[in-house]
Image (cartoon, rainbow, N blue to C red):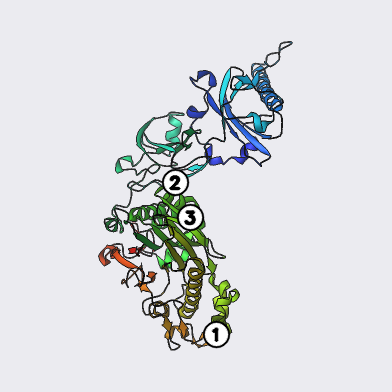
């Protein structure tokens, strides 16, 4: 039985039902060409779906693949007849008239034709509904599209800022995003959210003017106060599916003007030329931390509340990352929802694929993106550091020494710190690999001893991965290490050893002291961006906590992108600000190793 919102329709994402009625719900009698009847039918699935529009009503059926065609056609015909009966009954009640004797709903002939021949009623659904068949419903005809390119996700960002890229969140089934068509429109009249103004001209459509094409659109200051509309057509080569029209929830708003990263973009206008690769490491400040009372009143009281909102900050983050034209991007403090709904579609539009590692018992984690035209992901070797310490035999010696102090051991085991490890292969030279690591070490100012143990585990794991999976591959180790250049962690990486006398072993007091000589699993590594005066700049603190570590015997650094000047940062008192989305600053450098 047909229903506009049948149980089967609930299987489709609600956000896809946003196409304007003028586009999709048009009576077939007024068409100069056939409208589609979209059929989704996959081998191994028990059901198939059939969707089409009839006289302004969306029909969606969920049927067994093993059912005969005749039953489906009869169901369509009976559904239309019942609908006619309900309409006549409604009119009779409205006019208080009497139903005439013998008055019955009209019978509607429904049939399926393929290659000029009517398909037999005994044919099974799985075979009957072929691409190119024609569904006849009375005087209406529909071109059957079997497994046509279809949007499964299609939505615009909530916040639109002038001068900042608008990247829709798109997922297509049976299609290729690179083949899809996109047309952007600007509303002809300024948008008002006032209910009174909307009620004054009910149903009025001010019209739209085409302003661009392409998957990403950057509105200008002339668009401020106007809504945007995107018409997107799913495609796979020469095959097209049903287009969707997405209208922005609100109007384009004014941007913050000059941002702290604008001058840095002047150094990254073009991608790095092979065999060099551009690497970015950036803690983007998770929303779960930006929206706490502590953040608003203690950590960032100088920052306007609206500038801490996720939608606003995401505009800045996406523009900043897009402008760096990086080949490898390692991010920390990435909310899971941000990775899925915001960063992935945005960076995908700019040519990057990504992987995510959530932090145990948290809503945020680590993300690594790589340019798909230059790299392919060969394997992942992520670990949780405390779990690896206690379960992997390669850490048994370190575990034995840490176990000498139960208080320190318990604190280490309570931490959910993760290490994200991705082995990439250079598509320009197959066999040329790189091991990319990404982490965010324990944050507490008095947790130097915990971070030392965490770093010892991380380096040992990375040595093992490279030896087993990618012998000879260079290491690129990015992250927020929460460690200044005078810390034990930095000394372990730069000098390959930390003596038992180092002050970090007693950083949390004598009860958690566990002095030891800790050796790195690698020869001394190099900080590719050296030791900048700050990568974290907040009220009451500024210092270098973030690094990109490399192996100096196999990698060179042809270019380091300078950080924003002290004057640029202090213009906003501290970070984050209306012109900078995080309390950290991105590290960017070009790296090169011999092919």
Q: Quadrant of the N terminus?
A: top right
Q: Is residue 322 visible?
A: yes
Q: Are marks 3 and 2 in contact (CB under 8 Å)?
A: no
What secondary structure is found at the residue carrying circle 2?
loop
What secondary structure is found at the residue carrying circle 3?
helix
Categorize mark 3 by other alpha carbons within 10 Å: few (<14), some (14-19), many (20+).
many
The quadrant where residue 501 appears: bottom left
Lower position in the chain sequence, tag 1 or tag 3: 3
Lower position in the chain sequence, tag 3 or tag 2: 2
> In terms of depth relative to the viewer, which is nearer, 426 or 39?
426
Q: Quadrant of the C terminus?
A: bottom left
Query: Would residue 38 appear left or right of 259 to someone viewing this image?
Result: right
**Residue 339 - label:** 3
Mark 2, mark 1: which one is toward the viewer? 1
Categorize mark 1 by other alpha carbons within 10 Å: few (<14), some (14-19), many (20+).
few
**Residue lying furthest top:** 101
**Residue 401 - label:** 1
Q: Position of residue 210 (x, y in %)?
A: 36, 33
Identify whether 216 is placed above or below 505.
above
> In terms of depth relative to the viewer, which is nearer, 304 or 577?
577
Q: Position of residue 227 (x, y in %)?
A: 39, 39
Mark 3, mark 2: which one is toward the viewer? 3
Instruction: Please report the residue visible at 53 percent of the width from the left and 25 percent of the height from the top.
Output: 35
Q: Are marks 2 and 1 in contact (CB under 8 Å)?
A: no
* Mark 2 to mark 1 CA distance (whole Å): 51 Å
Mark 1, mark 3: which one is toward the viewer? 1
Instruction: Please report the residue visible at 44 percent of the width from the left and 59 percent of the height from the top.
Output: 425
Q: Are marks 1 and 3 in contact (CB under 8 Å)?
A: no
Query: Would residue 485 appear left or right of 420 to someone viewing this image?
Result: left
Q: Which residue is mark 2?
A: 157
Q: Position of residue 372 (x, y in %)?
A: 43, 52
What secondary structure is found at the residue carrying circle 1?
helix
């Amino acid at each position: 039985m047909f229903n506009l919102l049948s149980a089967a329709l609930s299987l489709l994402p609600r956000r896809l039902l946003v196409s304007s009625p003028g586009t999709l719900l048009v009576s077939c009698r007024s068409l100069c060409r056939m409208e589609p009847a979209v059929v989704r039918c996959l081998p191994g699935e028990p059901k198939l779906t059939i969707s089409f529009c009839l006289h302004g009503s969306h029909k969606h059926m969920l049927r067994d693949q093993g059912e005969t065609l005749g039953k489906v056609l009869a169901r369509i015909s009976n559904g239309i007849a019942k609908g006619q009966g309900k309409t006549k009954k409604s009119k009779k009640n409205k006019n208080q008239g009497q139903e005439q004797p013998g008055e019955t709903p009209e019978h509607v002939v429904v049939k399926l034709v393929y290659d000029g021949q009517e398909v037999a009623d005994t044919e099974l659904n799985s075979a009957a509904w072929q691409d190119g068949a024609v569904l006849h419903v009375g005087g209406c005809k529909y071109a059957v599209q079997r497994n046509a390119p279809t949007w499964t996700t299609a939505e615009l960002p909530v916040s639109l800022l002038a001068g900042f890229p608008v990247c829709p969140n798109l997922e297509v089934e049976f299609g290729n995003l690179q083949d899809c068509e996109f047309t952007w429109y600007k509303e002809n009249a300024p948008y008002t959210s006032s209910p009174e103004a909307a009620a004054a001209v009910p149903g009025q459509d001010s019209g739209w003017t085409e302003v661009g094409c392409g998957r990403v659109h950057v509105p200008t200051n002339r668009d401020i106060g106007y809504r945007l509309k995107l018409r997107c057509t799913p495609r796979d080569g020469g095959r097209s599916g049903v287009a969707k029209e997405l209208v922005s929830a609100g109007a384009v708003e004014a941007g913050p003007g000059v941002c702290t990263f604008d001058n840095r973009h002047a150094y990254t206008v073009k991608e790095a030329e092979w065999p060099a690769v551009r690497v970015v490491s950036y803690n983007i400040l998770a929303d779960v931390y930006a929206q706490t009372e502590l953040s608003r009143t203690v950590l960032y009281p100088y920052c306007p509340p609206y500038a801490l909102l996720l939608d606003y900050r995401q505009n800045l983050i996406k523009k900043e990352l897009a402008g760096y034209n990086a080949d490898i991007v390692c991010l920390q403090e990435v909310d899971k929802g941000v990775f899925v709904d915001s960063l992935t579609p945005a960076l995908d539009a700019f040519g990057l694929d990504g992987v995510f590692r959530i932090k145990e018992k948290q809503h945020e984690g680590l993300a690594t993106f790589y340019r798909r035209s230059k790299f392919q992901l060969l394997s992942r070797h992520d670990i949780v550091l405390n779990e690896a310490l206690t379960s992997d035999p390669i850490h048994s010696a370190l575990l034995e020494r840490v176990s000498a102090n139960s208080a320190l051991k318990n604190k280490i085991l309570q931490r959910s710190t993760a290490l994200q490890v991705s082995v990439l292969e250079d598509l320009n030279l197959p066999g040329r690999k790189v091991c990319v690591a990404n982490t965010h070490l324990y944050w507490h100012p008095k947790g130097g001893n915990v971070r030392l143990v965490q770093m010892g585990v991380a380096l040992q794991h990375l040595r093992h991965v490279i030896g087993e999976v990618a012998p000879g591959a260079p290491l690129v180790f990015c992250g927020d290490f929460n460690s200044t250049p005078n810390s034990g962690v930095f000394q372990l990486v730069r000098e390959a050893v930390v003596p038992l006398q180092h002050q970090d072993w007693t950083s949390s007091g004598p009860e958690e002291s566990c002095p030891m000589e800790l050796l790195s699993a690698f020869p001394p590594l190099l900080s590719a961006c050296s030791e900048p005066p700050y990568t974290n700049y907040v009220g009451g603190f500024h210092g270098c906590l973030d690094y990109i570590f490399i192996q100096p015997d196999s990698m060179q650094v042809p270019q380091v992108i300078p950080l924003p000047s002290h004057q640029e940062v202090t213009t906003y008192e501290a970070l984050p600000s209306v012109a900078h989305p995080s309390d950290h600053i991105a590290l960017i450098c070009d790296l090169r190793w011999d092919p």
